Amino acid sequence: MVKRQYAYLFMVIPALVLFFTFHTYPALQGIFYSFTDYKGYGTWDFVGFKNYLNVFLDTRALSAYGFTFQFAIVATILVNIISLFIAIGLNSNIKFRKTLRAVYFLPYILSVLIVGYIFKFIFTHIIPGIGQALNIEFLSTNILGNPDLAWVAIVILAVWQSVAFNTLLYLAGLSTIDQEVYEAADIDGAGAWAKFWRITFPLVAPFFTINMVVAMKNFLMAFDQIVALTGGGPGQATESISLLIYRGGFQGGEFAYQSANAVIYFIVIVVISIIQLRVLERREVK
């Protein structure tokens, strides 16, 4: 018994050490420096909660929060609607079902940066070219250069790539539904929409909750898509919180200030995730 416990400890401790070294320790270090005026180099002094208070007075940070929430909410809703209906289609008895599942999963295994640069070329050259050829005015310009529309391009890219993972989770949920339930609904004369709204959606509700929470968390932390597509521009119109923290902390000599911003943002994400879980779990079938 004692030897077995040593074996378990031998397996667990290395992972624990690595996790603490590369995750927990840097996080604790960032929290510590958030109470200082550390620039990322040189000496530092304690400044208390000054950095935290300054975040709420920083118009650039508040603008980044506004853009990030707008982008995350729209992308989360679109991803879950599209991936749920794709999953229902791929779960039905259609030809080439397995092939189509593999095709729909391909975007998820591609590098975000590579996909981002491809989409940037499409938005910059191909779509304006088509718009000019067909004399369609709203397609004739590059929306990446429009401060009011650039975020739409980021949503399109993020949704296109994220749908694959969410579809996979919904497929797992749909596979748990007993087909006899649908057969009973057919006998009762239920239509397609009634079967979806009264059977399918309530029974995949736990997966809907997981997808909503995971998608929202991932989109709130969006970084690669924005770097590849707009770099935060035009101006600072599409600068997310993650991008602002990276630029200010590692390029702008604001390590302590952006560490405070990161701590605040971490708390915001945790609170949003808890609220999502509490609200969505209430409507799940028990």
Image: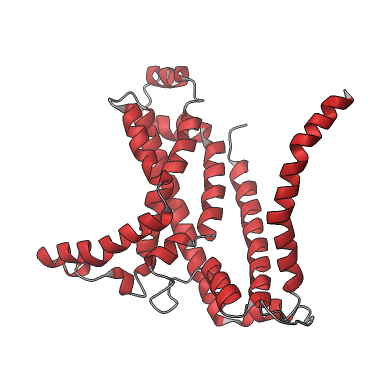
> Residue 160 at what x, y percent from top left?
37, 50
**What residue appears at the point 33 percent right and 27 percent down from the top-left corner?**
97
In this orientation, which residue lies closer to the viewer: 56 or 3? Answer: 3
Say left or right for 56 vs 82. Answer: right
* Residue 128 placement: quadrant: bottom left
Which is more toward the observer, 6 or 159?
6
Identify whether 212 is placed above or below 37.
above
Q: Is residue 138 at least partly visible in the picture?
A: yes
Tell me: 28 left or right of 243.
Answer: right
Colour mapping: secondary structure
Which residue is rendered at x = 39% and y = 17% of the image? 187
Where residue 182 sits in the image (x, y, percent)? 42, 22
Quarter of the image where one finds residue 206: top right
Taking 73 as reference, is 138 left or right? left
Work out which quarter of the rendered image holds the N terminus and state it. top right
* Residue 45, picture quadrant: bottom right
**Quadrant of the frame with the C terminus:** top right
Instruction: Decide if residue 142 is on the left or right side of residue 110.
Output: left
The reply to whether residue 81 is visible in this rendering is no
Q: Is residue 284 above or below residue 153?
A: above
- The percent coordinates of residue 242 (x first, y second) are 55, 66
